[in-house]
Amino acid sequence: MEASVGLGLFSLSAIIVDKAEPSEALRSNVAWSLGRPNATKLLSSKQLNAFRKGEWPTQEVDIKAERGAYMICDTVDLDAGASEHWSILADVNKGPVEVANLMAALERPEALQAEVAADVEEGSAHLVELVAASDGLQLTNDRLLNIRHFANTMFNIMRGGIFDDNYTIEKADFTNYIHKANIELFTRGLRLPWKGLMRPLPFKH
């Protein structure tokens, strides 16, 4: 834990290999929080049971041989109608330079929060575009049904992707696929409509 900025680093001392050779692990997974600068940070779940019994946890800085976690503990007093916001963020496979840059960014939490919010908005808009490309957007009077259709379509495109350019495909890609998938059909010949990059293929007799 880089306690000065609340950055949790999760890494191995050495890469797990099945060879008798040195293999130092130079990359880390990271987690950090924004909005609660004075919160107690935990890197594992070792203190959860004590917390459930009413004990206040102590800051964790160096945890070894335990399953990693990132949690924050703080107190919040809210007036009627008031609200508080904070974020917990995580990323993977960061090198030393990326970690150093993130630590520098965490020293300016307001700017980093704005950057994170903008990135979330951009990613959400791109996700809607991808789902829309597979007819995943619908509007009915049943909001839960709309959400379920969106989610189902999203999971489908995560598995199979989407068709770009309004289902137009490269002729060479398509014919190569047919050649591998159905050699008999390819040998007899295909006739494809002329559209964009697709043109008729002569039948063989």
Image (cartoon, helix red, strand yellow):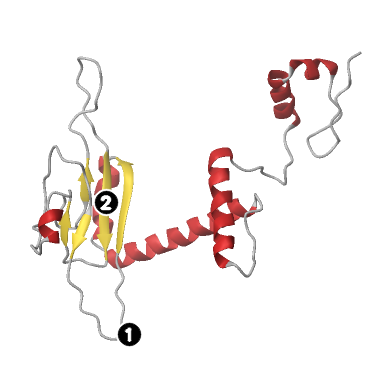
Q: Earlier in the sequence, mark 1 or mark 2?
A: 2
Q: Which mark is residue 93?
A: none
In terms of depth relative to the viewer, which is nearer, 144 or 162?
A: 144
Vertical comparison of 21 with 48: above or below: above
Residue shown at the point (31%, 78%) measured from the top left: 83
Question: Which residue occupies the extreme right position in the image?
Answer: 205
Q: Are marks 1 and 2 in contact (CB under 8 Å)?
A: no
Write down the quadrant of residue 36 in the picture. bottom left
Give the image location of residue 186, x and y in percent. 79, 19
- Disc number lying in front (1 or 2): 1
Residue shown at the point (74%, 25%) measured from the top left: 175
Vertical comparison of 105 with 169: above or below: below
Label 2 neighbourhood size at 10 Å, few (<14), some (14-19), many (20+)?
many
Left or right of 190 in this view: 39: left
Identify the amino acid type marked 2.
Ala
Left or right of 126 in this view: 203: right
Judging by the rendered image, the residue that carries numbered circle 1 is: 81
Residue shown at the point (10%, 57%) measured from the top left: 50
Give the image location of residue 73, x and y in percent. 18, 63
Judging by the rendered image, the residue that carries numbered circle 2 is: 31
The local secondary structure at tag 2 comes to: strand
The local secondary structure at tag 1 comes to: loop
Give the image location of residue 130, x and y in percent. 59, 51
